Amino acid sequence: MTDDRTKASEEQMAYANILNIGMWIGLLILVVTFIVYVSGIFQSFVPIEELPKYWGLKVKDYLHTLNAPSGWGWATLIGKGDYLNYVGITILAGLTIICYLVILPILLRKKDMPYLVIAIIEVAVLLLAASGILKAGGH
Amino acid sequence: MINSKSFFNVLLIISSLSLLFIFLNPSVFASEGQDIVRGVASGSNPPWWVWPLSLFVVTFILGILAVLGGVGGGVLFVPIVGGFFPFHLDFVRGAGLLVALSGALAAGPGLLKRNLASLRLALPVALIASSAAIVGAMIGLAMPTHIIQTLLGATIIFIVVIMASAKKSAFPNVPKPDTLSQSLGIMGIYREESLGKDIEWRIHRTPQGLVLFIAIGIMAGMFGLGAGWANLPVLNLLMGAPLKISVATSKFLLSITDTTAAWVYLNEGAVLPMIVVPSIIGIMLGSIVGVRILAKAKPKSIKWIVIGLLLFAGIRALLKGLGVWE
């Protein structure tokens, strides 16, 4: 007979539920915005037919040549077909942060201090990565 | 009448031959793109939509092969697309991370709910690996392309060796859990349907495992590969988690490890929707088809087809990085 202990913990279920909803929302937005992008409904920052001229460039040269934004600069160009796709990408990339935030109160209520600390530090790490503060130097 | 196993075998052979044809004719893809980059005006350049369409077809096939070969999409995606498409490796690695991330996000909820992926095991490991992945991503984006290409080739060949030789243990023997895992309460119990009984598990050698996850995180971020190929042996063989728990936790872990690295690539501008979106959709649809094929048949040769593809792509990356095979 299946033991109750085989069931996932409360925080694990909460994490899974948010992940499930967020993943589908992100994916749906990603597909819809891509259709909008290739259909040409919105003008693109880089004209779609000219993109092959640039995608072989190193990213730093790509940004420099096209005067394209880095970091969160894309948010100011959300009306452009290509940068509109970043909405879905950002949701997918940001989903883990939301999942961690959802389990924090559960871990606090359970007084699971080691995992509460781990989760808080992880949120800080994820926010640091997402912030755009960290810059790769070099070539 | 052709049975389903024969049909899937034929489908796999056709898929593999298609990939081989594409790869052995780099003029179909790579040299065209390189000419464009060099600014060579050529009337024979294909229209823009050929690239995302080709990418979709190739990633769809990779999605099938990844499921049947038991590997993540990212580890196939980066060397193959990086080696045979005209996109710069910076954009390929950014896309590779998002491909691996999407696959992990899609699989995560089911694995967590069935208590196969363990949050208690994943959270401490993820903290180490995701922090290291940021460092890896920054190193990868700062390095000259030929060096990162060479290192990628060497890493892929190393992965091939691991895949060809590594053993797996369904239920590793953990005589005594270590102090750290005990104090963190890293243990669990899951229903093993094949045996019809509940399996209690615990782990050992946690500090050694965490140290290895620093290296795994750095490599994941640097090459955009995902890291399932490395997560699994560490969780299963070193730390002693049962195979099912290791496979599921490894997959879920990617959703955290790859997130931090993906953010670095995103913020550096190394994410092009025209590469990312067809790849994600292609590999996800391919994975769905792969799972259906897996339910009916699993040709033994598939592991060696995947290993062969990876070896070929690894050698290509290595020679491209060394300037031998441009």
Image: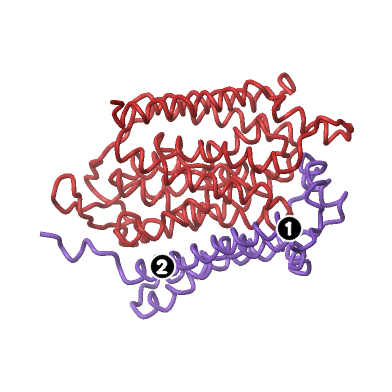
Chain colours: A purple, B red
Front in this rendered view, residue B187 or A55 = A55
On the same chain, marks 2 and 1? The answer is yes
Residue density around tag 2, few if under 14, some if 14–19, many if 20 or more, within 10 Å:
many
Q: Quadrant of residue B162?
A: top left
Q: Position of residue B300 (x, y in %)?
A: 33, 26
* Residue hosting label 1: A82
Q: Could you tell me the amino acid type at mark 2?
A: Tyr
Q: Find residue A27 and report its image quarter.
A: bottom right
Q: Where is the C terminus of chain B found, in terms of image quarters?
A: top right
The residue drawn where x is 42% and y is 24% is B304
Q: Name the kind of residue labelled 1 in the image.
A: Asp
Local secondary structure at mark 1: helix
- The residue drawn where x is 49% and y is 62% is A23
Q: Secondary structure at mark 2?
A: helix
Count how many numbered circles sit on residues in the image.
Answer: 2
Q: Is residue B264 above or below residue A26?
A: above
Where's residue B218, x and y in %? Answer: 58, 45
Q: Is residue B195 left or right of residue B15?
A: left
Q: Chain for mark 2?
A: A
Is residue B76 shown left or right of residue A7?
right
Q: Position of residue B296 (x, y in %)?
A: 29, 37
Picture quadrant where residue B92 is located? top right
Which numbered disc flags the more N-terminal residue, 2 or 1? 2
Looking at the image, residue B267 lies above or below residue B42: below
Give A130 or B89, whichever is nearer the viewer.
Answer: B89
Q: Which residue is mark 2?
A: A15
Numbered label attached to residue B169? none
Q: Residues within 10 Å of mark 1 (few under 14, many from 20)?
A: many
B146 lies above or below B137: above
Question: Which quadrant is the N terminus of chain B positioned in?
Answer: top left
Question: How far, Cα to Cα, is label 2 from label 1?
Answer: 31 Å
